[in-house]
Image (cartoon, helix red, strand yellow):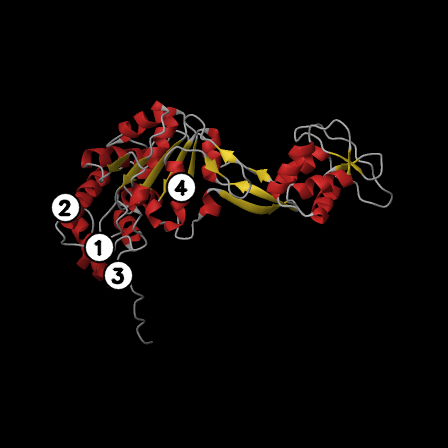
Amino acid sequence: MLNTSEITRLHAEFKNTSVSVRIGEIRDRAESMGFDRKMAYKTVKNLFVNDTIRGHYFFPNSDAEPTPVKVVAKAAPAPAPAETFKNALAVSSVSDDEIYIPSVDPTFVKWGEYKTVFNVLDSNLFFPLYISGMSGNGKTFMVEQACAKAKREYVRVQISPETDEDDLIGGFRLIGGETVFQKGPVIKAMERGCVLLIDEIDRATNKIMCLQGVLEGNPVLLKKTGEVIAPAPGFNVIATANTKGRGSDDGRYSAASIIDDAFLERFVATIDQPYATPSVEMKILAKHAVKYDVDDSNFVEKLIAWASVIRKTFEDDAIDDVISTRRLCHIIKCFSIFTDRTKAIELCINRFDEETRTAFLDLYTKIDESTPTMEELINGSENSAEPEVAPV
């Protein structure tokens, strides 16, 4: 059969014809257009409606109402022409469930460059924004909540080294027994005029260079269908990353790649987001404490002091790891289950190597005198071992 582009061109030749067309005329016209006569015949026979006269076919408008199909004895009924044509052209969104206006999260605290992000979104202008910062400091959450406040639809795309044009722009999929072109999240966001959040963009390879035109606010040609998609008013792109596109020198983000400079140049502005200040983190943890029904403000204060000392030590290159705001929230959540400060902290820092984990826990015992020291923990563990049974 002819490909999608050829079907579209052939259909355009006859779709406004009010009467049926002889198959011979169709084949002649197809040949003059550079198509194979036999392939044109097979395409018309399979996709378009046979008139009551043998050897004649009818080409409806793509938005036409379904026309009854003459069924030959013992042959399966052909689908309605309009539906058949849509399937033949095979362009579909399939589902838009990933596009929505985020809900306002009661644990969110406005801080840092939140107002900058909100003003960009509220302006409705095309203003590509790049946000970098260490893991767990609220970059993605800030964008989501800015969309919620501005009542803007958004779609989040999670980037990995395998992400390519097919994932972003779209590609052919087998759906319901039909091969259709499924539009990717980038195209859906452009059509809807919503916010496209590209999360962890520094995990991508050069396969995302297909977004260069998108970052300029230009229409995009779907190479596989020939359709041109122009961005609707309000469309915008925001990218988050742990690095500024130059890789990770210290190895903390080993999967971070070096992003092409021509690609980075297409972002209008860049925000470098640090961790929140102690006063801001106090508000964040207090809200999480309310969420998880934790009534222990003293524990929250100790956690903030503990994290602040660790970060200062990290900045002085004395340690290789740091406690993020996200991890502090995890500790509060963990504490709501076990109601044990030491256990909650231990469970949430076990991902670090033994030396770092021990140093972090030891530091906390110095800040919070109500918790047992490392020596007490070790002795307690030994004393809790199963007692020896005296011989009878």
Residue 14 image offset from top left, x and y in percent: 69, 32
Q: Nearer the viewer, residue 384 or 149?
A: 149
Spatial CA distance of label 3 from label 1 is 36 Å
Say the numbered circle drawn on residue 250: 1
Say the numbered circle drawn on residue 392: none
Residue 204 image offset from top left, x and y in percent: 37, 49
Q: Residue furthest right?
A: 73
Bin the neighbour count of mark 4 within 10 Å (Cα to Cα): few under 14, some 14-19, many 20 and up.
Answer: some
Say the numbered circle drawn on residue 312: 2
Bin the neighbour count of mark 2 within 10 Å (Cα to Cα): few under 14, some 14-19, many 20 and up.
Answer: few
Q: Earlier in the sequence, mark 1 or mark 4?
A: 4
Q: Amino acid at mark 4?
A: Leu
Left or right for 19, reference 199: right
Residue at 72% from the left image edge and 34% from the top image edge: 81
Spatial CA distance of label 1 from label 2 is 17 Å
Say the numbered circle drawn on residue 211: 4
Q: Nearer the viewer, residue 250 or 382?
A: 250
Q: Which residue has dot 3 on it?
A: 381
Bin the neighbour count of mark 3 within 10 Å (Cα to Cα): few under 14, some 14-19, many 20 and up.
Answer: few
Residue 146 image offset from top left, x and y in percent: 34, 29
